[in-house]
Image (cartoon, rainbow, N blue to C red):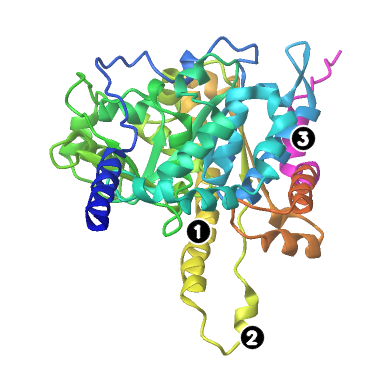
Amino acid sequence: MLYSKLVLLLFLLLMVSGCAHYPVNPPLHQYDPEAGYRLKNLAARDNSSRLLVILTFSGGGTRAAAFSYGVLEELARIEIDREGRTRRLLDEVDIIAGVSGGSFTAAYFGLFGDSIFFDFEERFLKKNVQGALTAKLFNPINWVRLLSPQYSRSELAAEYYDKHLFHGATFDDFLAVHGPLININATDMTLGARFGFDQTHFDWLCSDLLRFPISRAIAASSAAPVALSPVTMRNYAGSCGFRAPADYERVLATPDWGSRRYRAFRRMATYLDSGNKPFLHLVDGGLSDNLGLRAIMESVILAGGAPEILQQRGLTEVRKVLFLVVNAQAEGDPGWDKRERIPSIMTMISISTKVPLNQYNFETVSLLRASFGHWAERVAEARCAPEIIKQGRCDPLEFFLVDASFQALADEQEREYLQRLPTKFKLPGEDVDRVRAAAELVLRESSDFQKFLLSLRPRPVLP
């Protein structure tokens, strides 16, 4: 009798586990380059058409989410004069690219706007999210679900984010808000390359981003290896009439591995072969770009250049561009240099990701800064006749880059303390407050940021 009950119980468990499946991303029935979640399709925004403000929020768990939050608080306090009107600088933000921990702040602000300043601390920043996720993992009911090969720890995390933060919202809900474009970034596990949750990427897959849950995008962006599992998506390429960019075939016809555009198209071409790549497995966005900057730079590359991307995004009137890079990177523990003991496996795993990412972050920022001159030249050539450019009468496109990081703090003791905070989804409330205060201080002491603010002030009219 007992044996029969055990067999029945085992059968029921197998049935339940077999029913557990990740939410399948919906197909796109008909490709339309003008439709979907794109910057030009956001609800009409009452901000300046001559100013483009781009924020990028790095990874780094709650530490990164709190640092990004502190930046938003400071931007809300700063008032600027634009075209005869006084506005908060926060209201001029056009794009926020988020990675891992920073993607939580980006998505929450994109969905709820100023409400973030009233409830985000309680719901996320000062909540033991890591403990809550661990509790879900050790719930026996979820053990059964996790037996399914089509269900994972990251799906449990996505369910938690959906219930406590995003309440069933999809990317379609972003469109209804008078806010910036939110670009959430993950990493394609097999390609080792950035994958963005934007309709441009989803077009290649013939998938509809508007119906995709924000919570699953966040789960993919923050799916740290070992602790969490990849988020799986289906590839429907070839089923919606998608057309690659006009010069796609021409670029691929002449292999040039020294060309960023050629390499970018080669990577995107793998998505068009749904026979060999019917699924995507996405992990933490920090593995391919922990700053979120590559999302912007690769968009320029795929479009063919700065004039082309501004034309495609409906930004032809832009004259000033601010990149505010919010970088909450942590530093390695120098104490290991004083110990003879061999580091543990977990220490090696942490170092093997943290140290290369810190170097990669520096190179990414340097590459962006080096691109400004070329981009400004290309835009000037597209906007003005050669003789106008020679006479210096072509209204220039000005770029400003603000690298906001803990390294900019003058207080060495505070800087080292914040850089040692763990990359977890759990921080003591006092540490959250210290990170937020650091964000305010970094911006106020940044000469690059003050230079940008000065450029916005009306110039006196000479007699």
Q: CA distance from mark 2 to mark 1?
A: 23 Å
Side (left or right) of 29 relative to 406: left
- Mark closer to the chain start, 2 or 1: 2
Q: Which element type, helix, strand or loop, lies under badge 2?
A: helix
Q: Mostly what secondary structure, the magenta segment?
A: helix
> Which picture quadrant has residue 110?
top right
Identify whether 383 is placed above or below 365: above
Q: Quadrant of the N terminus?
A: bottom left
Is residue 442 found inside the magenta-colored segment of the image?
yes
The residue type indicated by label 3 comes to Glu
Q: Foreground: 122 or 281?
A: 122
- Residue under pointer 1: 357
Q: Foreground: 161 or 398?
A: 161
Residue for point 30% across, 25% down? 26
Q: CA distance from mark 1 to mark 3?
A: 27 Å
Name the residue furthest front.
1
Res. 396 visible in picture: no
